[in-house]
Amino acid sequence: MDESRVHLVELRQKKGAERQQKGGLRHPERNISMESSSTLGESSKGPSDFAYEQRFLNHRVIPIWNQLERETIIEYEIGKFRIMLTSWLSCSPFVAQCSYSLQIAPPVLPPTRDRKRPHSFAELVKSRYGSQLDEMNKNIKEMEVDRQKFSQDPTPKFFFDKLTEAVLKDTAKFVAIGSSVNGFVSKSSDFDFVFFPTVTAQRIRFSRDFHNNHSFKMNFMQVFSKLISRESKRLGFSVKETVVLSRLRVPLLIVRFENGLSIDIQFSEHGFHAIRNTHIIRCYAQCDERFSQLFMWLRTVCDALEVRNSKFGLLSSYHLLLLVVHFLQSEQSLSPWPVLPVLSKTHPKLVASSIPIEDIVSALERPAPVINWESHNKMSVAELAIRFVEYYSQFNFSTEAIFIAKGLTMKRKQALNSVQIQLIDPFSPSTVCRSAYAASAFISAITFLRSQMKKGLMLDALPNYPEVELFKRETQFASWRVQMSNRRVL
């Protein structure tokens, strides 16, 4: 190498060392110590050095230089990447050897509180309105206590026992069904009975003649209503009116008394599904007390919104019970711990459809059986209520059918212009809710409940909800509400 060039290189290295001793330049923006570009000498940088350095400086990166003899390490950090540029000075003043490596640094995540958001409607309501949910839970339990006090009133049972003795002989009886048996009776409840001939041969013959001969059906029900009116007056309970509904799928006799009591007497077909339904709901009520509490809350809300009235083709109490049973027993709605078991699987000898109807009637006349079941689900009734609203607000009634005996839903398509709530109980091959008006009314009510609960409304105001007037105005022209005005109130 030419001596003049070697002398020039040594002179530049000497000047660079002097500058380093005096202290490097300060970066004007980052306040990071950084050597001047003249440290390496203009001729000592290759084209790649200038290209990478300019690129990193344009991205406002932070360079950190460490001078180790003839090796210069430049480390750049851009977001999640860390790039190291190493430059070795050769003996030649015109050549610089460069190498660089790419390292992936751990990602920098935002604080947890910034990322945490409610994952569902239920979680959002819980996080915003915890105190209101506590008050709601308290109100539901107080309502349950009042209901239990009313159910212990012996007057209705005493009267109905006396009426049965006066009207019927030993060959037939009134079998109590519905709320008066399964434990959900309240001040607004009707008392439901099924006319049940006790002798098997007579029961089969009566059922055939009654349902196949309309003239016999009308005469029998008319005479029966007059007999009840006469005997009730003799017992001190004057009858206000009687209504004979002989053309219903299950003929019904309604008797209203002056003191406010009302009884509905059904004339079921040979299967007597109403008796079996009462028995299985009664068994479910023994599994967990939250079942009855959630149902009473739902019935109170549906009554306030005017979407429960089977006589107008809307939901009945039995429909609401099945909706609650499915929600509480299905892992599709409460995972991984349901509140109720699937009795058709866990206790088949207790609720199977093959059990003779006489045995079911006898079971209803005895105290409720003890069900060996304890749920791992410890949610409060208020939390179950908002999760109930969340579950059914996302439920597709046009494609999903609910099977109580299986504890799950299955795909079953139906016509879009006539959507029904497909509720299949263990004793019926098809849905027990056949009215499209019931589905439309329930969907409207659940949608409204979700929107109000998201605002903190309709939570702690049980049983009086001022928001129901808004719902009535919003649905005043809905088909299910309009058809109610065209029917006579029974």
Image (tube, helix red, strand yellow):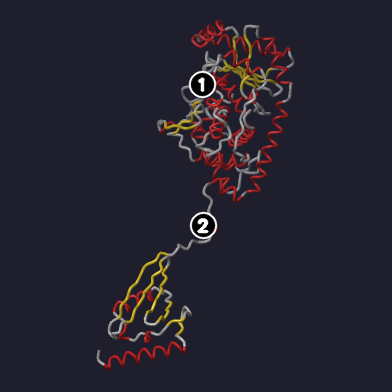
Q: Which residue is mark 1?
A: 427
Q: Nearer the viewer, residue 356 or 188?
A: 356
Image spot of residue 38 (x, y percent):
37, 87
Image spot of residue 330 (x, y percent):
52, 34
Side of 220 relative to 240 (left or right): left
Callout 1, which amino acid? Phe
The correct choice, above or below, for 37 with respect to 222 in the image is below
Quarter of the image where one finds residue 227:
top right
Image spot of residue 191 (x, y percent):
64, 22
Q: Which residue is mark 2?
A: 115
The correct choice, above or below, for 21 with respect to 382 in the image is below
> Upstream in the sequence, badge 2 or badge 1?
2
Image spot of residue 65 (x, y percent):
42, 79
The correct choice, above or below, for 282 with respect to 67 in the image is above
Residue at image location 46% in from the left, 24% down from the top: 430
Please tell me whether mark 2 or mark 1 is closer to you in this view. Answer: 2
Residue at image location 36% in from the left, 69% down from the top: 101
Question: Regarding mark 1 in the picture, which secondary structure is present there?
Answer: loop
Residue at image location 28% in from the left, 82% down from the top: 95
Question: Regarding mark 2 in the picture, which secondary structure is present there?
Answer: helix
